[in-house]
Image: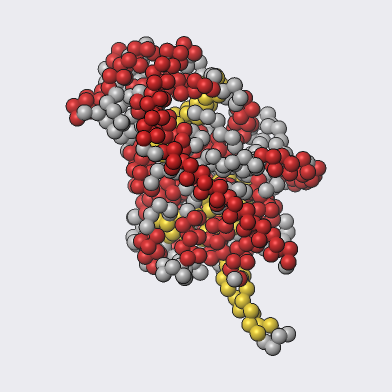
Amino acid sequence: MIVVEYTDILIATMSSLFSKKRKQPAIESNAGDTISDGSHKSTTPPKQRITSSLSSTLVSNSLTTTFADLGLCSPLVSTCRKLGYNRPTAVQRAIIPQILNNSNNNNNNTNHHLLTLSATGSGKTAAFVLPLLHLLSSDPYGIYALVITPTRELAKQIQQQILALGSGSGWKITCALIIGGENSTTQSLELMKQPNFVVGTPGRLAELCRDGDGSGLYKPNFKKVKFVILDEADRLLCGGSGFERDVAECLLQSTTTMQSTRNTTNGGDEKKKRVRRNICRTLLFSATMTRSLASLEEMAGAGVGRLPLKKIVVRPDGTWDDGSGSNNQKKKKKKRKVEDTIDNDEDTKEEKSSGDSGDDESDTDNSSESSDEGSTPNIPAGLRQEYIFMPSRVREAYLLCAIRTLMTHGGRSSKKSKQHQQNVGGGSGWNNTIGKDVDIAELLGNDDTNNPDEDDEGRSKYPRAQSAIIFVPSCERCAHISGILTELGIKNVALHSLLSQNRRLASLATFQSQHVRVLVATDVASRGLDVPEVDLVINSELPRRAVDYVHRVGRTARAGRRGRAISLVGEQDIDLVHEAERISGRSLDKCSEITDDMAVRLLGPVAKASRLTKMKLMDIGFDELVAKHRERKRRDRRRREKAEKRARKAISKN
C-alpha cells in the first residue's frame, strides 16, 4: 500500500510539473547564442589518472585529448581503438570525467545527478557506458546500472554497444535486455542471474517490478543499483506520453529503499517509509530541452538540495556549459516565469481544447511539449535541410519522385541484385516488380542503365543517397506507403509498433545490413538509432511536435558525416515549417531537383499501386488490427487519467 501511494504521488508530481505550457520564444538571429549564454568552464576533474597539465583549452580540443587522458583504464582504451573510436567526442570529454570524479568521491551526499544535452549522433551512449565499465572493473557485481529507453530498438542497440565496449575489458560483462514483445518468464530468469547491466523499456521493467511477487516471476532486485540512466529523457518524462507510471515505478524501485522508523508517541510502533538512496545517481541524456526537463531542473536547482542536478550543454563547436549559468540566464528565467503566469489561464484553455482529440497515432504522443531553444543543441552542421512544396493529395507521387531522383539506382537494388532476383523469381515484395521499374524509369526519363551521373560500375559521380529513412506519422500510413513502394519496384522494409517484436528486429537488421536501402518507419525509429550509412531522411509529413523533427533528421549526418533531410510540405503545413526552422536554428531551402512535371507523370502508377495496397491490407485484416490498437490506447489513457486523479486526492489529504 505504501508503494502504491508513493507511486501515485510521484505520478501526480510529474503530471503537475510537465502539464504547463510554455510560451514559444522567438528564434534568435545568432544560432550560437541560442545554446547558452554562460561562459565555458572546464569540467575536467583533478584525477590522478588525468594528466596534471590538462587545461580547459586542451579538453575542448578534440585533436589532442585521448581516452587515456580522460582517466579510462587501458583495456577500455584498447577496445575503443579497435572499434575505431580514435578521439573522444565533445560530449564524451565533458561527461566521462564528471562521472569518474563524482563516483570516486567518498562523500555520497555531494554526488551530482547529470542532465546532458547534446546533438544527435554525438556519441552520448559511449559517454556513459565507458565510465560505467571503468568503475565496474574495480568491483564487478550485478545489477550495477539500469538503462531505461523509450523504444525497444534503441534498447537493443544500447545492449549491443555495452557488450561491444566491454568485450575487451578483460572480464565478462553481462547485460540483460528487458523489452516488451518477448517472453517475460525468460526475462525474469535473466534478471535472476544478476547481470551487470539491465537495459529495457519502462513498460516491461515496471511490469516485472509490480507482478514479481504475485505472479510467480522473479522480482528484480535494484537495491544495489548505482546508476540509473534515462536515455532520451525528454521522451520518457514527457507529459501525456504514457510512460509516467512506469518510469515512476522503475525510479521507485531503484533510487529509493524502505527504512523503518520507531514512533515514540504511539508506544514505539515501527513505521516504514521510503527514503532516497544517496549512493544511486541518475543520468539523463537528451538532444532537446523540453518543458519536462526544464521543470525538473527548476525543481532540483531551486536551493532545496533534495536532488543536486547538474546540467551540461554541449555546443556544436565542441565546447560545453557546465550549468553554472550567468546573471543574464537567471534574468531570462525570471522573465519567462512571469510570462507563464500571465498566460496560464489562456494556455489552460488551449490545452483543454487540444486534448479532446483522439490519439490515432500509434507511435507518437499528442502532448504539446515544446523545446527550450536556449538550451537545445543545434542540428548537425553537415545536415542539409530542404523542402518540397506540393498538394497534399498527391503526396505519394512526390515521395516516389524524391526516392527515384535523390537515391542511387532510383532506390532500387543494384544491377547484380536485380539479376539475382530475376533468376530466383523476385524479391521480398508481394509480387515481381522488375517490369514496373522500367516503366517508371521511362516516365521520369532517367533510365539508370544510361545515367550520365554514374560510371560503368554504377557509382554516382555526384552525391546521391545510398540509404534512406522515410518517416510517416502513423502505423496505417507506414504500411500503406511501404506497400506502394513495393508495388512500384522499390524494395523496402517497414518498422512500426503494430509489427511483432521479431519482425521489428528483423526489419531493422535487414536495413542496417544494407540488404534493403529504404526504411519506412514511424517515430519509433527517430530516437537514438545509429545507422551510419543513412545519408537521406525524408519526412513524408512534418511532425506536429517540433522536437520530433530534430530527432528525425538526426538519423543522418551523424558523427561528423554529411546528410540530407527532405520534408514534403502541403498547403496546410506552413506553420510546421516555421516551427522546424525555429527549433533547428536554420532555414529550409527549396529542393529544385523535384519538379511538378515529374510528379504528374507518376500519378497514374501511384494511384493504381495505392488501390492494390489498400486491398491487400484489408485482406490480411490490417484495419481490424489498427482498430484494436486504437481502443487499447484509449483504454490506457483513461486508466492513466484515473490514476492521476487518485494521486491528486492522496496529495490533498496529506
**Camera-side residue of 436 and 225:** 436
When the figure is inspected, residue 297 is found, relative to residue 557, above or below; the finding is below
Q: In this figure, what is the number of numbered marks?
A: 0
Image point 49% across, 23% down: which residue?
395
- Residue 26 in the image, given as x and y percentages of width and height: 71, 32
* Left or right side of 406 for 227: right
Image point 77% across, 44% down: which residue?
344
- Residue 536 in the image, given as x and y percentages of width and height: 44, 29
Q: Quadrant of the C terminus?
A: bottom right
Image point 56% across, 23% down: which residue?
570
* Left or right side of 357 for 81: left
Image point 62% across, 58% down: which residue?
643
Q: Quadrant of the N terminus?
A: bottom right
Q: How is the image coloured?
A: secondary structure
- Residue 219 in the image, given as x and y percentages of width and height: 45, 68
**Camera-side residue of 311 and 508:** 508
Q: Quadrant of residue 11?
A: bottom right
Q: Quadrant of residue 328?
A: top right
Inspect this view and state whether residue 172 appears.
Answer: yes
- Residue 123 in the image, given as x and y percentages of width and height: 47, 44
**Camera-side residue of 144 and 324:** 144
* Left or right side of 346 for 611: left
When the figure is inspected, residue 137 is found, relative to residue 238, above or below; the finding is below
Residue at the extreme bottom of the image, as rendered: 267
When the figure is inspected, residue 170 is found, relative to residue 494, above or below; the finding is below
Inspect this view and state whether residue 108 appears.
Answer: no
